[in-house]
Image (cartoon, grey):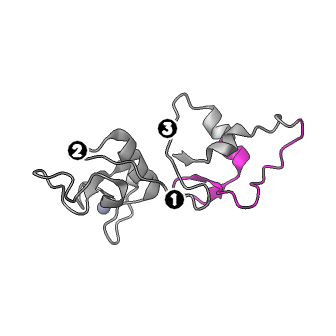
Amino acid sequence: MVTVPVLHLLTSPTSTGEASTGEVPAGEVPAELTGLAPIPADAARQIVSTQSVLYRILTDPLTGTVLDETAQTYTIPANVRRTVTAKHKQCAAPGCTRTALRCQADHILPFNHLLPTQGGLTVPENLQPLCQPCH
Ligand SMILES: [Zn+2]
């Protein structure tokens, strides 16, 4: 999974007629390949250009923090699950290093089936990835 600010994708090396330096302008969040160090914007553009499906996850442009997508259903929508996976890199259990991509999404505060709005919401802050053995 590659997490890349949309502005990196909208800025192509040829759009200004100048060659890209591949450097991320100061203040911008670098692109990231899950499980690895940040990658240059040009590398992220190359990886993304080979994909036929892209998912949008809203993040704070200054901090890169993934923003909330609310859900008041027990079933975790695919977009919320992707947000949790992007926010956490691995299983949340102490000492477990399994990648979040292979984990289940777990409600930290249990979902309230009688009063869904009264806690245990299906929002990224209340979800964590847990691999099946840890879950
Ligand atoms: Zn685990």
Kindly indicate the quadrant of the structure image that contains residue 75.
Answer: top left
Q: Position of residue 68 (x, y in %)?
A: 41, 52
Which residue type does callout 2 highlight?
Thr
CA separation in Å, label 1 and label 2: 23 Å
| Residue 129 quadrant | bottom left
| Residue depicted at x 22% and y 44% | 73
| Residue pictured at 76% horizontal, 37% vertical | 12
- Write down the residue under mark 2: 73
- Which residue position holds label 3? 55
Question: Mark 3: which amino acid?
Answer: Tyr
Secondary structure of the magenta portion, mostly?
loop
Residue tagged 1: 65
Within 10 angstroms of label 1, few (less than 14), some, or many (20 or more) residues? Answer: few
In this view, the residue farthest toward the right is 18
Q: Nearer the viewer, residue 127 or 130?
A: 127
On screen, 64 above or below 53?
below
Q: Does the magenta-highlighted stretch encompass residue 27?
A: yes
Label 2 crowd (10 A; few <14 / some 14-19 / many >=20): some
- Tell me which label, 3 or 1, sits earlier in the chain: 3
Residue at the (18%, 55%) spot, across then down: 111
Q: CA distance from mark 3 to mark 2?
A: 21 Å
Q: Nearer the viewer, mark 3 or mark 1?
A: 1
Q: Which region of the structure is painted magenta?
A: 17-44
Query: Mark 1: which amino acid?
Result: Thr
Task: Please say if the residues under marks 3 and 1 sit with CB atoms less than 8 Å apart.
Answer: no
